[in-house]
Amino acid sequence: MLQNLDRLDLLIAHYVAGSFPEPVHVLVGSYLEMQAPAARFAQTLEELAGTTLRESEPLAVASRDRRLREIFASAPLPPELEPKPSHGASFPASLLAYAGVDLSGIPWKTRLPGFRRHVIERSREVEASLLWVRPGRALPRHGHRGLELTLVLEGEFHDHRGNFGRGDISIADETLDHRPVAGEQGPCICFTVLFAPIVLSGSPWRLVGDILGI
């Protein structure tokens, strides 16, 4: 878990720098809404960055007037992309605006027994999805070909690294092979961003059992 916590600091630093694609920016922004200490750390980094900018020599901006005109001329979001009203939503505001619906309006698709998914966005860079896993269900053991970030919105899951509860982020990369298991107290609902497909691993018999949810 310590390595995961160290990486969280790096995630927040990249978030403040604005260097993430939109789905990752939404995931980390949602995490900051759910975790007050992390939000204070992000604010400290923003203040330090602001101080550095103020103390730096100003640089001329090419085509300043044209860029300003383009910014102010940007069209508003079309109605179908505007966030829908929330009715007791458990989603952070950042995720609600990105997903366009609250938890009660997610059009889940069953992928495996006890496992549902809704893909919000799929591009060449990333795949952003919401996951619903029934209490006690194990997902098949798998490894990673690239980074996977998972924010727990409701419930919890655990693997050999420890427990991840509401407001926690799991950071997985090519070095991690794991078998996540949802907690027994209620379904586990997560927002996840994948940079590359996962790779199933482990015993074939165990994989069959986990795929069937038994």
Image: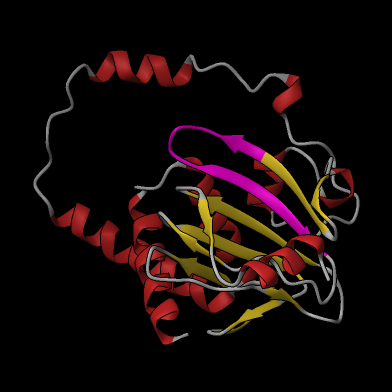
Q: Which is nearer the eye, 27 or 51?
A: 27
Q: Residue at image x 89%, y 56%?
A: 88
Q: Which is nearer the eye, 143 or 166?
A: 143
Colouring of the image? secondary structure
Q: Residue at image x 70%, y 51%?
A: 130
Q: Is residue 128 magenta?
A: yes
Q: Residue at image x 34%, y 63%?
A: 13
Query: Where 89 falls versus 65 (above or below)?
Result: below
Residue 46 in sight: yes
Q: Position of residue 115 (x, y in %)?
A: 79, 57
Q: Position of residue 160 (x, y in %)?
A: 56, 85
Query: Where 39 falls versus 98 (above or below)?
Result: below
Report the side of 15 relative to 88 (left or right): left
Bounds of the magenta span? 120-133
Report the side of 13 relative to 83 (left or right): left
Report the side of 171 relative to 133 (left or right): left
Q: Position of residue 10 (x, y in %)?
A: 34, 67
Q: Considering the image in quadrants, where does the C terminus appear?
A: bottom right
Q: Is residue 171 magenta?
A: no
Residue ranking furthest to the left: 57
Q: Which is nearer the eye, 176 or 20?
A: 176
Q: Residue at image x 45%, y 48%?
A: 195
Query: Where 69 falls versus 86 (above or below)?
Result: above
Residue ranking furthest to the front: 205
Q: Position of residue 105 (x, y in %)?
A: 87, 43
For the image, the number of numbered tags is 0
Q: Which is nearer the eye, 116 or 206?
A: 206
